[in-house]
Amino acid sequence: MTIETDAVIVGAGPVGLFQVFELGLLEVKAHVIDSLPHPGGQCVELYPDKPIYDIPAVPVCTGQELTDRLLQQIAPFGATFHYGQEVTTVEKQPDGRFLVETSQGTRFLTKTLFIAAGVGAFQPRTLKVEGLDKFEGGQLTYHVKNPADYAGKNIVIVGGGDSALDWALNFCAANEDGNPHKAASVILIHRRDGFKAVPANVAKMRALCDAMEMQFLVGQVTGFEESSGRLSDIKVTGSDGLTRLVPLDMLLVFFGLSPKLGPIANWGLEIDRKQLAVNTETFSTSEPGIFAVGDINIYPGKKKLILSGFHECALAAFGAMPFIFPEKKVFLQYTTTSPKLHKVLGVESPVFD
């Protein structure tokens, strides 16, 4: 079965969710596809509990809170979500619509396509130790989904960037909201005594080491030992050439992420430095009817901010109207005063004296 629709959005991160809102205001219902099993994109997948400070009128919120609020905001528009699916094929049809197919075999015939896929599919840079990958998803992880899972554990963190330092400090303390996730022990390992991280956090880490609340080792993971099928120790080779055994319950590795465009690179769109070139009047790609918003696009002066992505969504929605409603004149209306928009949003029109 092929689903016929006016709009398909690829990506359910904050920008993709806000694209639902902007299309909804123009009475366009969208289908949203995301490779992750949940909404929120990298905000939820990579830093669900880290604070975000630059969302207008919201002094601070986490990635998960931002996602929850956006889902609440777009609820009136009845978008349909297709999680755990990657778009594999995009083909333009003789009637101008696009045939979109996913890795799960879901097919769409859509008048417009909005790509809000961040910088593509994130792939963590892995720890290259032969045989260690069998512990991945269990004792070995490349991102933290639920900090409470690490409470009372002996944790080894490998890396020298902000994520490694942030989580090392995080697991040395209890949550301010009273839900402790303090680890039994934290050992930070980096290949050199220098960090690509916020200096203040480096200073905090060194102070915790001086207070014997955590440890820092200079070296590289070169091997491991296991017991009864579980990872029991890792081998760390230092700059002195000596290899030491470090016992652990959990191993967290933060070597950064390698973004990959994936199938998007094969859709025939103009690409500049692994991003989609767009016209900033409508945020159309080189293929009319296909739009790109958020970190996936590039144009002169581009700033990779959630705020910028929200702005792009508004212009892309209006830019799509000639493809969706070619005979209809679309006018800018304001949610403050428009009874039509109030009806779409499911709210009562205010009475002004």
Image (cartoon, rainbow, N blue to C red):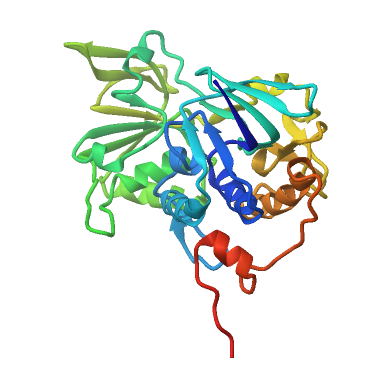
Considering only vertical position in the picture, is 242 above or below 159? Answer: above
Name the image quarter holding residue 293.
Answer: top right
Quarter of the rendering occupied by the N terminus = top right
Name the image quarter holding residue 242.
Answer: top left
Going by the picture, which residue comes out furthest to the front? 327
The residue sitting at 72% across, 33% down in the picture is: 275
Residue 213 shown left or right of residue 349 in the figure: left
Q: Position of residue 33 (x, y in %)?
A: 54, 32
Name the foreground residue: 178 vs 33.
33
Name the image quarter holding residue 72.
Answer: bottom left
The residue sitting at 65% across, 25% down in the picture is: 261
Q: Position of residue 351 (x, y in %)?
A: 55, 83
Considering only vertical position in the picture, is 21 above or below 276? Answer: below
Residue 185 visible here: yes
Quarter of the rendering occupied by the C terminus = bottom right
Name the foreground residue: 55 vs 285.
285
Name the foreground residue: 168 vs 194.
168
Going by the picture, which residue comes out furthest to the top? 130
Residue 347 shown left or right of residue 325 in the figure: left
Count the marks: how many? 0
The residue sitting at 42% across, 31% down in the picture is: 37
Residue 55 visible here: no
